[in-house]
Every structure is written in structure tokens, then in C-alpha cells.
Amino acid sequence: MTTRGAATAASEERIAHTRNRLVLEQARAVGLLGAAKNTRLSGRVPSELIEAAKKRAHVTSDTELLELALSRLALEDDFGARLVGRKGSISADIDLGI
């Protein structure tokens, strides 16, 4: 791996770890994560999917992956739907200054 490639990989990993930490902190702040782990989740999925998700998220354990994925899903906003819903709500003759 080149020096630039290694630096890019390290930067991506730092960003992923920061993003993960912020998601989990937000989930804790709204009461979704706490000290008690009182539910077991089980399912069958392709190992390639799990490994790709772990690699992308820079996590190593299945539990870590599940907590992160479920937290992201639970905290997901509806920005995309709201944006699409606004289509046509701004007059076509407005001057955007561009």
C-alpha cells in the first residue's frame, strides 16, 4: 500500500470511528442504549454481508455491528422524504442568484 493509500485508509478509519462514537452517544442520550443488554437477536445472513458491513463501519464484533446498525436505523431522520415532498413548492421564477 502506498503512503498516500495508507494515509487515506487511516483517515477513513478515524472518520468512521468518530461517526460511530457520535451515533452511539446519541442513541445513549435518547435512551436507546444503556447498561442492560436484555434482548438477544438472532438471524441467518450471508457472511459476506457481515464482513462487508464490519469493514465499512470499522468494527470487529457482531454485537458492535448490530448496536451501530440498529442505532443508525432508529435515529435515522426523514430528510430525504421531506426534501422530495417539497418538490414544486418553490416558485419556478424565484431568483436564486446563481
Image (spheres, rainbow, N blue to C red):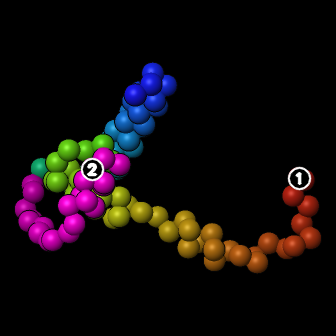
**Residue found at the very far top of the displayed protein:** 3
- The image position of residue 33, as x and y in percent, is 21, 54
Taking the image as drawn, is residue 29 in sight?
Answer: no
Q: What residue would you read off at disc 2?
A: 54
The magenta segment is 36-56
Disc number for residue 98: 1
- Image quadrant holding the N terminus, namely top left
> Which percent across, then down, holds residue 34?
17, 52
Q: Is residue 5 above or below residue 18?
A: above
Which class describes the residues within 10 Å of circle 2: few (<14), some (14-19), or many (20+)? some
**Dot 1 lies on which element?**
loop
Disc 1/disc 2 C-alpha distance (Å): 42 Å
Q: Mark yes or no: residue 85 visible.
A: yes
Q: Nearer the viewer, mark 1 or mark 2?
A: 2
Reply above or below: 76 against 34.
below
Q: Amino acid at mark 1?
A: Ile
The residue under the point 63% across, 69% down is: 83
Asked if residue 44 lies in the magenta stretch, the reply is yes
44 horizontally vs 21: left or right: left
Q: Residue at x 35, y 48 (%)?
A: 56
- SS for callout 2: helix
The x and y percentages for residue 27 are: 30, 54
Left-right relation of 97 to 6: right
- Which label's residue is closer to the chain start, 1 or 2? 2
Is 4 displayed left or right of 91 in the figure? left
In this view, 65 is above or below 81? above
